[in-house]
Image (tube, helix red, strand yellow):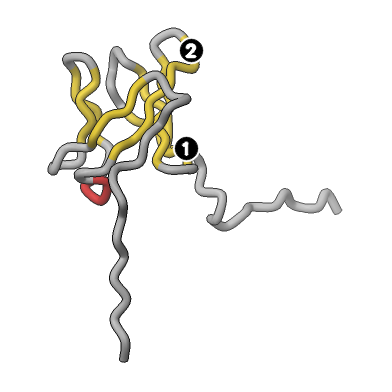
Amino acid sequence: MRVVKRCTTGHVGYPFHDQTITVTHCGRICFKTRKVNLSQVFAGQNVGVTQVGEHIWLVTFMHYDLGYFDDETCRLEPIENPFGPKVLPMSPE
């Protein structure tokens, strides 16, 4: 069995976002003076943050929008999983 190493050439940059923030080892992003819980799986990785409304910010990892947070409550609301199961409406019969 052959082992394949995955090497990165550096951190992902987000030139079209308002800020690029590195996720802490405990899975948080430090935004201004507040902390927003994201996930430990992103520890050490950069995420992009873009303001989309008054006090509302979008968090992006690579090409995936992860969710929105309000900079007053600092609670992240995840975006619906595009790969998750779909619930179809029932037939009116």
- Judged from this view, the residue extending furthest toward the bottom is 1
Query: What residue sits right under mark 1 in the picture?
Result: 65
Amino acid type of the residue tagged 2 in the rendering: Gly
- Against 91, residue 58 (above or below) is above
Quadrant where the N terminus is found in the figure: bottom left
Q: How crowded is the residue under tag 1: few (<14 C-alpha within 10 Å), some, or many (20+)?
A: some
Whether residue 91 is situated above or below residue 68 in the rendered picture: below
User: Residue 63 at what x, y percent from top left?
Assistant: 49, 42
Residue 47 placement, left or right of 54 = left
- The residue nearer to you, when weighing 87 against 15, is 15
**Looking at the picture, which amino acid does disc 1 mark?**
Asp
Splitting the image into 4 quarters, where does residue 46 fall? top left
Which residue is found at the position 14% from the left and 42% from the top? 26
Q: Secondary structure at mark 1?
A: strand
Task: Give the residue pinned by disc 2.
Answer: 53
Q: Which mark is residue 80?
A: none
Q: Earlier in the sequence, mark 2 or mark 1?
A: 2
Q: Quadrant of residue 35?
A: top left
Percent coordinates x, y for residue 19 in the rendering? 34, 22
The crowd level at tag 2 (other Cα within 10 Å; few <14, some 14-19, many 20+) is few
Percent from the top left, x then y, of residue 2? 31, 86
Q: Are marks 2 and 1 in contact (CB under 8 Å)?
A: no
Q: Which residue sits at x=83%, y=49%? A: 92
Image quadrant where residue 45 sits: top left
C-alpha gap between disc 2 and disc 1: 16 Å
Q: Looking at the image, which residue is at 40% across and 31% down? A: 14
In the structure shown, which secondary structural element does the residue marked by tag 2 occupy? Answer: strand
